[in-house]
């Protein structure tokens, strides 16, 4: 849901804010994957727990860094 909201915000107004929302959603998904039992993780449980958490947090961090470091276009 956070990714959908982030995409709408990015398309409608501020793409940096949209990327921050998506990044936050990925970080929350990583945290949930870390604490939820295997049977309750649902679609978050794709691979091993630590690999899933690492991938979700890494992609979220990369998006956050990209949103912060790409210069404004004039």
Image: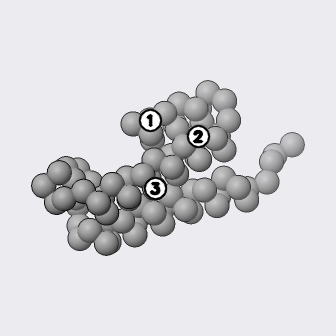
Asked whether, in this view, residue 23 is left or right of residue 50, the answer is right
Give the secondary structure at mark 1: helix
Indicate whether 48 appears above or below 1: below
Mark pair 3, 2: CA separation: 14 Å
Residue at 45% over, 56% down? 27
Q: Residues within 10 Å of mark 3 (few under 14, many from 20)?
A: many
SS for tag 3? helix
Which of discs 1 and 3 lies nearer the camera? The answer is 3
Residue 17 position in % (x across, y down):
64, 41
Which residue is disc 1 drawn over? 4
Distance Cα–Cα, label 1 vs label 2: 9 Å
Which residue matches tag 3?
27
Work out whether 68 lies above or below 51.
above
Residue located 33% across and 54% down the image? 32
At label 2, counting other C-alpha atoms closer than 10 Å, the crowd grade (few under 14, some 14-19, many 20 or more) is many
Q: Could you classify mark 1 by the number of other residues whose Cα lies within 10 Å: few (under 14), some (14-19), or many (20 or more)? A: few
Residue 51, position in %: x, y? 32, 71
Residue 8 left/right relative to 17: left
Q: Is residue 24 above or below residue 7?
A: below
Q: Quadrant of residue 39?
A: bottom left
Between label 3 and label 2, give the one nearer the viewer. Answer: 3
Q: Position of residue 12 (x, y in %)?
A: 61, 27
**What residue does disc 2 label?**
18
- The answer to whether the residue labelled 1 contacts the one labelled 3, judged by CB atoms less than 8 Å apart, is no
Residue drawn at x 23%, y 61% is 46
Which of these two is toward me, 37 or 61? Answer: 37
Give the CA distance from mark 1 to mark 3.
15 Å
Question: Can you tell which mark lies on residue 26?
Answer: none
């Amino acid at each position: 849901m956070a990714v959908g909201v982030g995409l709408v915000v990015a398309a409608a107004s501020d793409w940096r804010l949209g990327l921050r929302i998506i990044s936050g959603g990925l970080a929350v998904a990583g945290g949930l994957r870390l604490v939820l039992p295997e049977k309750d993780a649902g679609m978050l449980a794709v691979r091993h727990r630590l690999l899933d958490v690492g991938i979700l947090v890494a992609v979220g961090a990369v998006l956050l860094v990209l949103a912060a470091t790409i210069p404004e276009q004039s």
